[in-house]
Amino acid sequence: AATIVIMLARYAPRAFRAAATVRRSLSALAEEEAFAPLRPAVTMFSEEEVAVRDMVSSWCKAELQPHVREMDREGEMKPEILQSLFANGLMGMEIPEEYGGSGMNFTSACIAVEEVAAVDPSFAILVDIQNTLTNNAIRFWGSQELQDKWLPRLATDTASSFCLSEAGSGTDAFAMKTTAIPSADGSYYTMNGSKLWISNSKEAGVFLIFANAAPEKGYKGITAFVVDANTPGITVGPKERKMGLKASSTCPLTFEDVKIDASCVLGEVGMGYKYAIEILNEGRIGIAAQQLGIAKGAFNATMPYLRERKQFGQAIGDFQGMQHQVAQLATEIHAVETMTYNAARMKENGLPFVKEASMCKLYSSQVAERVASKCIEWYGGVGFTEDIIAEKFYRDCKVGSIYEGTSNIQLQTIAKIIANEWE
């Protein structure tokens, strides 16, 4: 006790003076904050963003939902639905209005992806690739000529594909073998090689292709090209027979002596590896939005059944065991939503977001799979049939842990950044 008294006598006056200073500082800060705009939660959207959400949700229910099962069975997208995406401005979300785009922000594009994914993830990946990869790559690094040529078409009538992966270069993307050798005068390039797992390739009218223009330089020779899909020498192969996302075409591409004008180079020669890394970082937030939509779509489709289905004289949703499962998954969905839109806001505000993008991509794929799987279980035997949409969400979500960077790659990216933060 004597020791405590001595310490109080020694340190208390100093502590009291410090506390008084803190109180004065907090008081001044409170006065400033009283006149400062409120900082909304990341899941609180602007009026414009809410309007996007409501419009896309209504469009999905009216024009997309009635055809989802048919397109999944046939493995084809209905052309009129694709055209409707363009007509409603969903394929050029961030393209400026002067090019025929919607002139929205990145968050709005993610909202659109989420809402479409809650109804049909096959169309969501089309909307995602168009908005977060191809459109933005051309906006960021395309010459004025490329922007003038392609942005109006991408906003109004032309789907696109992002062509990076090859048979021998998946995760190790920069081990690609496709080459684009410049002519002697540098006026054109001759492309030879192939790509694999190219989403939307049957529907695409333009390809963003990564090829090595100087193989002797290794990955520093990789260059990006914006190429018309009808260019002679380009062949789109047969569609892969996939577990999920069946309406979305996934095909191999082959290039045989394809002549590409030098004006088709995106940005600088040899900088393709840098562009691919940077655009995929933001693309991962789009994939998280897709996985979030899948989780919400499965969850929302299943919840009414938990009230309708009766066993042992009560709704199955009233059993405590079920309530705890519902609460757990609802919590995880909310966590994914918060992570995804936090990463989107960070990207919009020019903050470093690579770690957060990898985190939300990783976690969203895990949660979507858990939610879709549980929803099948909650339905019981009927959940294992095609009569219930939960099984489609389950099939469609699995690729979330694979494309645009596997889950292991996301873990490695997160770990590296954390290690650098603590050096």
Image (spheres, rainbow, N blue to C red):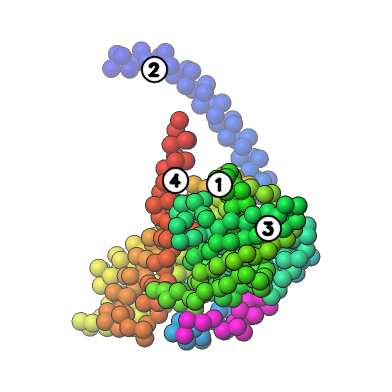
What's drawn in magenta, residue-wise? 74-91
Q: Could you tell me if the residues under marks 1 and 3 are in contact, i.e. CB atoms within 8 Å?
A: no
**Sequence-wise, which precedes: disc 2 or disc 3?**
2
Q: Name the disc covering residue 414, or none.
A: 4
Element at label 4 = helix
Instruction: Pick whichever, 170 or 256, lies toward us.
Output: 256
Q: Quadrant of the C terminus?
A: top left
The residue most toward the front is 184
Residue 44 locus on image (x, y percent)? 57, 60
Disc 1 target residue: 219
Disc 2 target residue: 8
Q: Nearer the viewer, mark 1 or mark 3?
A: 3
Label 1 amino acid?
Tyr
Label 2 amino acid?
Leu
Direction from residue 274 to residue 251 in the image, left or right: left
Residue 15 locus on image (x, y percent)? 47, 21
Label 4 amino acid?
Ile
Q: Nearer the viewer, mark 3 or mark 4?
A: 3
The residue most toward the left is 312
Q: CA separation, marks 2 and 1?
A: 65 Å
